[in-house]
Image: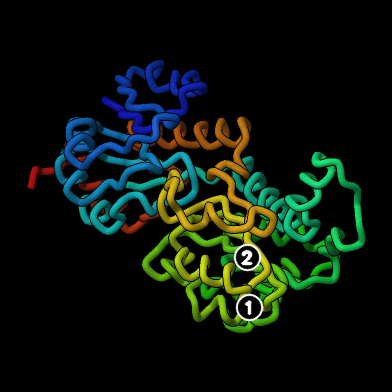
């Protein structure tokens, strides 16, 4: 059977050896470090005769791509989000979609979220250049405490929960918004579950920890930003699309909020002419979608990816399937041997 690796991490190619060792052929696409996305036509050519594929964050696997691959039985992503594939189309076609929520990745993203909060409240980007420029600390250069503040977490999935668990001993008040989490489950994390409006009004820090869905796209726009305190900070380490960047620029330039820490953007790589780049770097921290990444996290994600690929190629249902409604159709396809072309 044939596995196609779209967007491999070049320095971790050894992780994929078990696929070939199991007797499957392996086709390696452009490396992750090459930011050129495949066109739809190129993806069709690359994956057209594949039995399994590792997806990428760069391009979208559309219904047309999936329909053009009659042997494709699963697509695995080496990260948590699965917004880069038409999930409904995959389910209709009996293609399993898996993610890779490794422990290392979850912890790394939670740590990164808290890092951005601390860098903002301690005014790190303000004070470090002062020292390098020959100045010394003055009263007006001081930051503030995170302790005693209210932190609102939007999305209490794996990373949101890990962030709450790590913040609980810091003496902060934790608010959470997640329509899919019960109050009892939130209480176990020492999080008070509230509606989004209340979270935005009362929080000193707002952390966006959601997956990208039609429901979460632009969930933070001008209306929501105007609800926040002028002293509050917004941190996003999830996906760029949940925040309306045009509205965020207005909020930062207009003083609606105090600052932001962004690791993800609506367009990636962040365009050179993005208005976000012109904002005050002391108040707005921008990192290139890597602040929570580490070699351990990448290797952990890829390990899970390969495990899922091998399971699917061997006719087993991977533990990380996110579209479980596809399993009956997938099982039928295994018996039939393939899927008719459309």
The residue pinned by badge 2 equals 234
In depth, the one of 47 and 40 nearer the eye is 40
Indicate the quadrant containing the N terminus: top left, top right, bottom left or bottom right: top left
Q: In the image, 22: left or right of 123? A: left
Q: Position of residue 186 (x, y in %)?
A: 67, 71
Q: In the image, is residue 209 above or below residue 194?
A: above
Q: Position of residue 218 (x, y in %)?
A: 43, 69
The residue pinned by badge 1 equals 228
**How many numbered marks does the figure carry?**
2
Question: What distance separates the C-alpha of mark 1 from that of mark 2?
Answer: 9 Å
Q: Is residue 187 visible?
A: no
**Pointer 1 and pointer 2: residues touching (CB < 8 Å)?**
yes
Could you tell me which residue is drawn at 20 percent across and 34 percent down? 42
Q: Secondary structure at mark 1?
A: loop
Could you tell me which residue is drawn at 40 percent across and 63 percent down? 213
Could you tell me which residue is drawn at 70 percent across and 49 percent down? 111
Few, some or many residues within 10 Å of mark 2 (<14, 14–19, 20+): many
Q: Position of residue 323 (x, y in %)?
A: 36, 55
């Amino acid at each position: 059977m044939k596995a196609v690796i779209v967007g491999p991490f070049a320095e971790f190619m050894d992780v994929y050896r078990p696929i070939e060792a199991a007797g499957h052929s392996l086709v390696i696409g452009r490396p992750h470090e090459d930011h050129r996305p495949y066109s739809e036509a190129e993806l069709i050519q690359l994956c057209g005769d594949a039995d399994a594929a590792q997806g990428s964050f760069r391009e979208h696997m559309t219904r047309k791509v999936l329909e053009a691959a009659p042997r494709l039985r699963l697509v695995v992503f080496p990260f948590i989000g699965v917004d880069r594939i038409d999930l409904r189309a995959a389910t209709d076609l009996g293609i399993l979609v898996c993610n890779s929520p490794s422990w290392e990745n979850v912890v790394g993203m939670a740590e990164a979220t808290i890092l951005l909060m601390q860098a903002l409240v301690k005014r790190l980007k303000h004070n470090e250049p002062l020292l390098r420029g020959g100045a010394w600390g003055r009263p007006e250069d001081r930051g503030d405490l995170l302790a005693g503040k209210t932190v609102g977490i939007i999305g209490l999935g794996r990373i949101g929960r890990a962030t709450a668990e790590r913040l609980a001993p810091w003496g902060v008040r934790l608010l959470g918004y997640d329509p899919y989490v019960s109050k009892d489950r939130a209480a176990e994390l020492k999080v008070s579950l509230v509606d989004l409006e209340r979270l935005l009004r009362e929080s000193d820090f707002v952390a966006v920890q959601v997956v990208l869905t039609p429901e979460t796209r632009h969930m933070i726009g001008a209306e929501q930003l105007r609800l926040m305190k002028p002293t509050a900070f917004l941190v996003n380490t999830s996906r760029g699309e949940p925040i309306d960047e045009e509205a965020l620029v207005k909020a930062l330039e207009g003083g609606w909020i105090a600052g932001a820490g962004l690791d993800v953007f609506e367009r990636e790589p962040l365009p050179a002419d993005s208005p976000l780049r012109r904002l005050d770097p002391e108040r707005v921290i921008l990192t290139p979608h890597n602040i929570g990444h580490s070699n351990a996290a990448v290797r952990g994600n890829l390990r899970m990816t390969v495990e899922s690929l091998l399971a699917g190629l061997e006719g087993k249902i991977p533990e990380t399937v996110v579209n479980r409604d596809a399993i009956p159709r997938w099982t039928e396809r295994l018996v039939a041997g393939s899927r008719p072309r459309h």
